[in-house]
Amino acid sequence: MTKVEALAPAEQETLLGTSLSRRFARLPLWLSHPANIGGFYGLLVALALLLPYAFGDQNNEVWGVQWIYHTSLLLVACALSGFVSLVMISISKRHPVAPPRQILYPMPFLGLALLSVDRVGMMAMPSWLVTVVWALLLLPGPVYVHLSWAPRWRLLCMIEDGTDPFIGMEVKAEENVEAEEMVGEDTELLEVVDAFESE
């Protein structure tokens, strides 16, 4: 992380992103590979499916076998999507983009709720709606990896190899606005700003 700390604040923000990406950035590069992060998301979804599978009405006597089978499919599909994202990012050289969190974050919960309704037999779902349910469960992880984590992982690898990934990239200049102009005549607020700057 010392190489990352040597970067400018704007470059660090591009490289590390929000709290989730910062957690992944603390891991060794081999462990935080996009395929591993994708597979980890698949494992989280599989763990969430344990209760709907165990207590559902559909094939309840063999729910464990069905759950293991679907878990294997989830892990392989999500890990493979991480590999595909990394290949695409290495070709396009695209920098990370913030994923649409307001859309992605509720999707797995909505998918899990609909799947639970289907598994316990509260409502018969048409086949197209079951496909939508699985899409709600599966898409958020691969979309996050593709938009945000795979580009960040590529940049981290470049920094680890001693290459500056920000050469030739324009860094947005921060607007220097004097504290006095921001707070006007409010002396109490000025004192707080001065105390904060002195720390």
Image: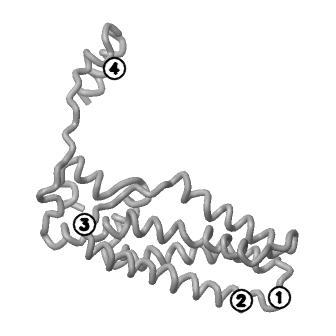
The part of the image, by quadrant, that contains residue 118 is: bottom right
- Is the C-beta separation of discs 4 and 1 under 8 Å? no
Residue at mark 2: 66
Instruction: Give the alpha-carbon distance from disc 3 to disc 2, as whole Å.
Output: 39 Å
Label 4 SS: helix
Q: Is residue 13 visible?
A: yes
Instruction: Give the alpha-carbon distance from disc 2 to disc 4, as whole Å.
Output: 61 Å
Residue at the image point whose x is 13% and y is 69% from the top: 162
Which label lies toward us, 3 or 4? 3
Identify the mark nearer the N-term, 3 or 2. Answer: 2
Identify the mark nearer the N-term, 1 or 2. Answer: 1
Amino acid carrying label 4: it is Val
Which label lies toward us, 2 or 4? 2
Amino acid carrying label 2: it is Gln
Residue at the image point whose x is 47% and y is 67% from the top: 143
Above or below, comparing residue 146 to residue 193 in the picture: below
Instruction: Give the alpha-carbon distance from disc 3 to disc 4, as whole Å.
Output: 38 Å
Residue at mark 3: 155
Residue at mark 1: 59
The part of the image, by quadrant, that contains residue 163 is: bottom left
Above or below, comparing residue 83 to residue 95 in the picture: below
* Figure quadrant of the C terminus: top left
Which of the pair 80/39 is nearer the observer? 80
Which of the pair 81/184 is nearer the observer? 81
- Is the C-beta separation of discs 1 and 2 under 8 Å? yes
Amino acid carrying label 1: it is Asn
Amino acid carrying label 3: it is Leu
Indicate left or right for 131 with 72 as reference.
right
Identify the mark nearer the N-term, 2 or 4. Answer: 2
Task: Classify 10 Å Cα crowding around label 3: few (below 14), some (14-19), many (20 and above).
Answer: many
Residue at mark 4: 192
Which label lies toward us, 4 or 1? 1
